[in-house]
Image (spheres, rainbow, N blue to C red):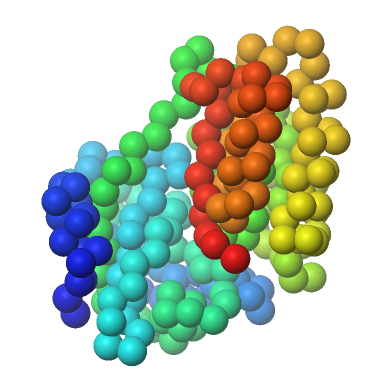
Amino acid sequence: MGHGWEGVVLKLMRGRDFTFTVTGAEQVTDTFRRVHLTDGGLLAATGGAHPTMRVRVWFEQGGKPHQRGYTLVDPDPEAGTFSLEFALHDGPASNWARGAKAGDTVDATLQGTGFTLPEPRPGRLFVIGDAASLPAVNSLLDAVPETPATVWFETVHASDERLPFRVDPDHHTLHLVPRRDAGAHLVAEVKAALPKLLGADSSDAYVWIACDTSTTRTLAAYVRKELRLPRDRVQALGYWRP
């Protein structure tokens, strides 16, 4: 399958192509599926993985290529394996994930995936995400497991409460927030709680936001402009569009 004009653009931006092979899959909940893959040499080529590392995976629908970004789950550089997790809905990526079986292959492009926590390392994390960004949320918590973290997680389905959250009750606080009013409810919940949690001195705080594009922009602007956190202490990326 060709990758169309998007593939050309990624090539111009020095994207590197790989082919992954499915080794198995598991249905985590009725709306969340995990697919296990070999990496086609990706982890060796990049020298390993970092928290929230994403690849652009190519899917076909109607004879046309579509690419979507996915976070590597439990990457193992020595074995050359990882998993991808899919919040299922209607679309080419979810359709592929539902039918993925051992031996299937899928193309992917790696481009612009760098991410590092600021130095000095934050003393507190404030994380805002949803099912689409859960793999990235978990990888961030795994990277600094003993750093106190408050997580606001927007839910859509009742089964979202059973998703594989990697939270440690000794260090992490998880708030499940039902999606209402196109994300406005989540925004209100964060705005009501975050200033009090930050307190008078927010110099040790780091805020990571990955929800739908509109919600992410609203919260990022609030944290930067109204709460006045420095840019290097805020990471925001819209993971999907309603």
Please name whichever residue, 161 or 74, is drawn nearer the observer in this view of the structure: 161
Which residue is found at the position 57% from the left and 75% from the top? Answer: 88
* Position in image of residue 162 (x %, y %): 73, 64
Quadrant housing residue 23: bottom left
Which residue is found at the position 84% from the left and 24% from the top? Answer: 196
* Position in image of residue 129 (x %, y %): 64, 49
The answer, for residue 79, to whether it is visible in the render is: yes
Please name whichever residue, 196 or 168, is drawn nearer the observer in this view of the structure: 196
* Position in image of residue 19 (x %, y %): 21, 67
How many numbered callouts? Answer: 0
Q: Is residue 147 above or below residue 152?
A: above
Please name whichever residue, 101 or 206, is drawn nearer the observer in this view of the structure: 206
In the displayed structure image, the side of residue 141 where residue 199 appears, left or right: right
Please name whichever residue, 179 or 108, is drawn nearer the observer in this view of the structure: 179
Quadrant housing residue 202: top right
The answer, for residue 166, to whether it is visible in the render is: no
Which residue is found at the position 66% from the left and 39% from the top? Answer: 219
Which residue is found at the position 62% from the left and 60% from the top? Answer: 131
Q: Is residue 103 above or below residue 78?
A: below
* Position in image of residue 193 (x %, y %): 83, 33
| Quadrant location, the C terminus | bottom right
| Quadrant location, the N terminus | bottom left
In the displayed structure image, the side of residue 7 where residue 190 appears, left or right: right
In the displayed structure image, the side of residue 154 where residue 120 appears, left or right: left
